[in-house]
Structure formats: structure tokens, C-alpha cells
Amino acid sequence: MDIKAIDIGKYKGIVFFTGAGMSAESGVPTYRGQGGIWHEYNWQEYACQEAWKTNPEKVFDFHDLRREEALKCFPHKGHEIITDVQDSHPNVTVVTQNIDGMHQRAGTENVIELHGSIWRVRCEREGWVKEDLAEGSFENRKCDCGAWLRPDIIWFSDMLNQEVLKQADETISNCELFISIGTSGVVWPAAGYPQLAKSSGALCIEVNPEPGEQSYIYDSVYRGNAGDVLPRMFNM
Ligand code: APR
């Protein structure tokens, strides 16, 4: 595959837009591909507000497993390249759909987490959100007030956090280089971001071994794995 090296100095703002495929090479399963989580688990039972209200223990067991699996995995070369690009450029943002914290573990800062994080919980009764970085299972499933805690994740049918959305919209509308990595582009509103970047005038590049719903939008498409393509794109 012929990959054109990018001169990052040419672009004022750079956005890496990532999905489950970014973490796939680290060993974290994707949602819809081969071995995808939603083939094994019915999201209606594990990943929606209704499921949590009906059976919070079952929902916590599922998310404990996600945390344990994530900790068995480590950032790959592609994650490191994004950190390196950020260290060499004043305006680099990661907008991710991933909840596994892998970008942060690779040392990347300025990460907008559209779908929340498995490393945070919130108490809906008391109205707070806090980190729970225990190694493995969540430290607590219940708040001191007696209410069930809730993983601070955007589940199916949830509204996205409006402040997070605003930040993502602004960052993407103002970027000049938009690189999408490892997303099938079927979950909205994230699926609208390639078009937003394109109509704002950014150069749009896709890295994904498979074509997706939004692939037609991109100026360049690299059909390969993130860990192979990113080092060649940035010569780092
Ligand atoms: N490098 C790049 N892309 C890859 C790799 C890889 N090594 N391996 C797989 N992919 C691609 C697949 O081809 C697929 O297009 O990653 C994509 C993963 O797609 P999904 O599993 O649908 O994940 P994503 O797009 O992130 O899902 C969006 O859906 O279930 C919800 O909230 C969940 O954030 C998630 C959202």
C-alpha cells in the first residue's frame, strides 16, 4: 500500500477520530466486527439505562469484565504515534468513541471521550461523577447514599453529554486535518463527524481495513491496520 507521509506543520489543527478498531490491535474486542462484543452480548441486557435499572449487578459484572480485559491489553505503536504527533504539534486533539482509556495510557492528552469512560462512575441521586481507577473491577457499586452507582458511559438510547459534544463539534469544525481510525461509522452523532470535518474544509483520511458507512467522504483511504499505517503516515 502506497502511504503518503504527512507534514504536520502544514495543518493548524489536527484531529484523530478513533473507534473500537484503534484498540483492536491491542487486543480489546470491537463491537461489530468478527468477535465483536454485540455478537456475544445482547446490548439490551448490558448497555442501556433500562438494563441497569432492571439488573444493576448484571450490568456491573459486564463492565467489570470490560475493565479487566482492557487492563490485560496495552497501547500499540499507533497509540504511541498519536502521542508523538501531539508532542510535536501545538493543536492535536483525539476525539474517541472508545471508553477503555487506551489513548491516555499511551500518554496522549487532550482526549475528548464521546461515549464516556469505564474508568468513571456517577451517582445519579447525588449528581456527581468521579474516577474509579481501581485495578480491575469497580471499587464500589453503590454510593454512600445507598443508591446504585452507574458507569459513566453513554449507553444505547442515552443522550451524549452536551458539553462534550460542543467541544467535539468546535474542535472538528476548526481542524485542517481529520484522521479517522477504526470506526464503522454507524453510531450517531459520531458518524456525522467525517462529514462535518469535510464540509469545514479539512483534509480527511480514513484508516480501516474494511470499508465503512462513511468511507465515501474521505479524501484518502488506507485499508490497513492502525498500528501499521500510522507509523508510515508520520514517519515517526
Ligand atoms: N485498525 C483500524 N481499524 C480496525 C482495526 C485495526 N487494526 N481492526 C478493526 N478495525 C475496524 C473495523 O473494520 C470496524 O470498521 O474498526 C471498526 C470497528 O467498528 P465497531 O465495532 O462498530 O466500533 P465503533 O465504530 O467504535 O463503534 C461505535 O458503537 O456500540 C457502540 O458505544 C459503542 O463506541 C461504540 C460505538
Image (tube, grey):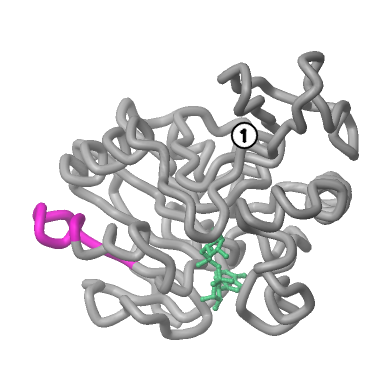
**Where does the image place residue 221, in percent across and percent down from the top left?**
35, 76
Q: Quadrant of residue 106?
A: top right
Q: How many marks?
A: 1
Left or right: 136 as drawn, with respect to 79: right
Q: Amino acid at mark 1?
A: Gln
- Label 1: element kind: helix
- Vertical position of residue 134 compared to residue 9: above or below: above
* Magenta segment: 196-205
Q: Check residue 41 for magenta coloring.
A: no
* Image quarter for ligand 1: bottom right
Quadrant containing the N terminus in the rendered view: bottom left
Percent across and percent down for residue 179 are 36, 57
Horizontal side, residue 170 vs residue 139: left or right: left
The residue to which callout 1 is attached is 104
Residue toward you, 99 or 46? 46
Q: Is mark 1 within 8 Å of ligand 1?
A: no
- Up the image or down, 128 lies above or below 102; here it is above
User: For residue 220, which quarter of the picture?
Assistant: bottom left
- Image coordinates of residue 10 in percent, x first then y, are 19, 44
Taking 220 as reference, is 177 above or below it?
above
Camera-nearest residue between 15 and 69:
69
Residue 197 on the magenta segment: yes
Q: What residue is drawn where x is 41% and y is 53%?
A: 17
Residue in view at x 70 percent, y 64 percent: 25
* Quadrant housing residue 101: top right
Q: Residue at x 55, y 33 (%)?
A: 108
> Residue at (76%, 73%) from the top-left corner?
41
The reply, left or right, for residue 38 in relation to residue 2 is right
Circle 1 crowding by C-alpha within 10 Å: few under 14, some 14–19, many from 20: some
- Which of 101 and 155 lies nearest the eye of the viewer? 155
Q: Residue 131: x percent and y percent?
A: 69, 23
